[in-house]
Image: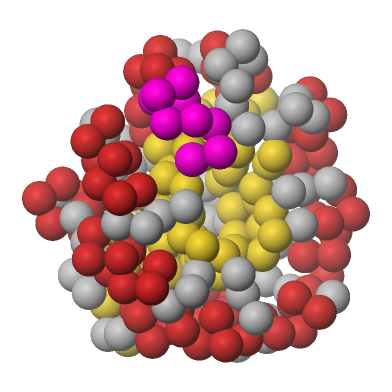
Amino acid sequence: MILYPAIDVLDGRVVRLARGDFNAVTDYGGDPLAAAQAWRTAGAQWLHLVDLSGARDATRRQTGLVEAVAGAGLKIQTGGGVRTREDIAALLDAGAARVVVGSLAISEPRTVIGWLKAFGPERLAAAFDVKLEDGVAWPVVRGWTQRSDQTLDALLEAYREAGLIHALVTDVARDGMLEGPNKALYDNLIAARPDIAWQASGGVASLDDLRALKAAGLSGAIMGRALFEGRIDLAEALAC
């Protein structure tokens, strides 16, 4: 299982949003490159970089930061407001190893399938933010205010023949809340679609959480707030 330290960047500062709310921002400092270098020193090979500025306004995309972090020796998985083929190409050209497509993976799967064919499945990851209703996962978009008209299981059928390899799923009720990951959700996804390398996103708060995700068969785990608040030591996490 790959551990992905996460850095969310808004206007050049490292932040964390609670449940994706731009009105609930915790500021962790003004040097995202230094944070990335610290994770690299601790042994990380990958970084999950979320461009919140680019998510709000495509003209403010922080492509230069991607280039700088790649130069520090980390493989970068990055996203935030990726809306066009040109967005993907620019991020890959800047040094990203993998680009994350979020809302469009839910609202326009045919478009994303075309991108998977154009760039290759190793260069893209689909991100599915979901809300659970009576145990059923429903993808959500537009700041998690609008529910898809189809369940996550149904949506994934559109990608079955498209070669999707990498996908990350966030139970939005747990994002940034340090309440533990939704292991039952991931168990169901792995059982239904073992052909996809699933990444857990949201809620990781302890080494025991990571051990449970690894035992369940997750391909990756994304950690943000728990690292910045010292609840998890990255070197220890990598060691276990």
Residue 121 falls left or right of residue 140 = right
Residue 28 falls left or right of residue 220 = left
Task: Answer whether residue 220 is magenta in the image.
Answer: no
Q: Is residue 90 above or below residue 229?
A: above
Going 27% across and 77% down the picture, which residue do you hit? 13
| Residue 210 picture location, percent across and down | 77, 65
Q: Is residue 234 visible?
A: yes
Going 50% across and 70% down the picture, which residue do you hit? 74
Going 24% across and 59% down the picture, which residue do you hit? 63
Instruction: Give the quadrant of the C terminus.
Output: bottom right
Going 51% across and 62% down the picture, which residue do you hit? 75
Residue 89 falls left or right of residue 4 = left
Q: Is residue 38 above or below residue 238?
A: below
Q: Is residue 62 above or below residue 139?
A: below
Q: Is residue 19 visible?
A: no
Q: Nearer the viewer, residue 192 or 33?
A: 33
Query: Farthest left residue?
Result: 59
Please identify the quarter of the rendering in which residue 226 is found: bottom right
Query: Farthest right residue?
Result: 215
